[in-house]
Amino acid sequence: MQTSATTTEFLVRKDHLGTTSLRTTPLPPLANGQVRVGIARFALTSNNITYAAMGDAMQYWQFFPVTDSAADGVAWGRIPVWGFGTVLESRLPELTVGERLYGYFPMSTSVDLTPGKVSAGFFFDAAPHRAQLHAVYNQYMRCATDPFYTADSEDVQALLRPLFITSWLIDDFLADNDFFGATANPAQPALLLLSSASSKTAYGTAFQLAQRKGVEVVGLTSPGNVAFCESLGCYHRVLTYDQLDQIAPDAPSVYVDFAGNAAFRMALHTHCKGLRFSSSIGATHVENMGGAKDLPGPKATLFFAPAQVKKRSSEWGAQGLGQRLLQSWQAFTARVSDPTRPWLRVEQHSGPEAVQAAYQQVLGGKGDPRLGHMLNLKP
């Protein structure tokens, strides 16, 4: 397979996410023990904006560091994305040219990986700079043996698989903790309040939670997204952010915050006297991010999905966890891809200018919630 002599990177200014740059650089010779992967296509969602917004705090910038990132006085970063790539060149006998991989990539045309032990199903990038980063993000699946993979559903996988795994883990975490006492009274359903209800991670969570007994899943969203959220059928109620008065203040409740809007978080904590737990997941409203100090009620707690993965892997084993995830994934994607009422419509973007436009749209949070963006930096 012919490989390019250069790679193109989509860079984002770390302290001002709306400022971007494209950089094309020569590729060095591939080192022994490495593989060079051509990044064929990747998804861009609000989840990736969260990676950028929390890039320093949660070490997301460290996965794919930018060489001489501050040479021009500006700190540049590469946002990690989930997608598919093909091995272009290999210095490992276990991985051959042409093999398809799924995993965590930079917004670039290629990346060099340093596989550790290679199994039939996957490998982990063992590059020194990734050694202290969580293994969930360092794993690359070999598509030929991946039970989640089908060639005709790559778009859905890239767009929803990492988000749904987070959704599944949120649902599992809340149930594992008995919804922090919110479901203690069988006569009074617990209110599970989800902000940014039109986001893919939120409605994946709602899909799972709606299957639980003793709960009422309430989606919180902007007026323009109410109809979309209602059409999904996974929310028992959908309210706009200014309709907090329609929530009974003393009802036992749990808040799952996908938006990261500090002002709304304060308003909800103040109104919901029966709030038992408040979990912060992401930041779709980047411009309104803020701290969680001086909140009435429970402390806002950041949910870290890899911690729940570690817990369940130790309890069920990796295979047991994988089987549960696969079963739930298949049920979810069947609903998402229902040809009579699909939840998702995929839009393809190829080339640097198209990627830039799609990025600004997702960053601004103004897009159609039914759209999923698949990107490729090659023209």
Image (cartoon, grey):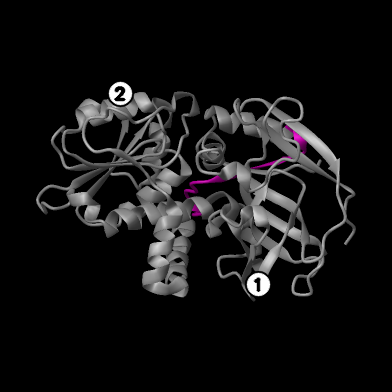
Residue 171 is situated, as x and y percent measured from the top left of the image, at: 34, 54
In the picture, measured across the screen, residue 76 lies left or right of residue 55, that is: right
As drawn, the label of residue 242 is 2
Rendered location of residue 53, percent (x, y): 53, 34
Quick check: 143 above or below 337? below
Disc tally is: 2
Look at 81% across and 65% down and name the residue there: 32
Quarter in which the C terminus is drawn: top right
Q: Amino acid at mark 2?
A: Asp
Residue 303, given in percent of the width and then of the height, sits at 39, 47
Q: Which residue shows up at 62% across the image and 29% down it?
A: 360
Which residue appears at 55% of the width and 59% of the height? 135
- Identify which residue, 206 or 74, lies in the foreground: 74
Q: Visible in this render: residue 370?
A: yes
Q: Is residue 156 above or below residue 280?
A: below
Q: Which residue is mark 1?
A: 117
* Magenta span of residues: 336-353
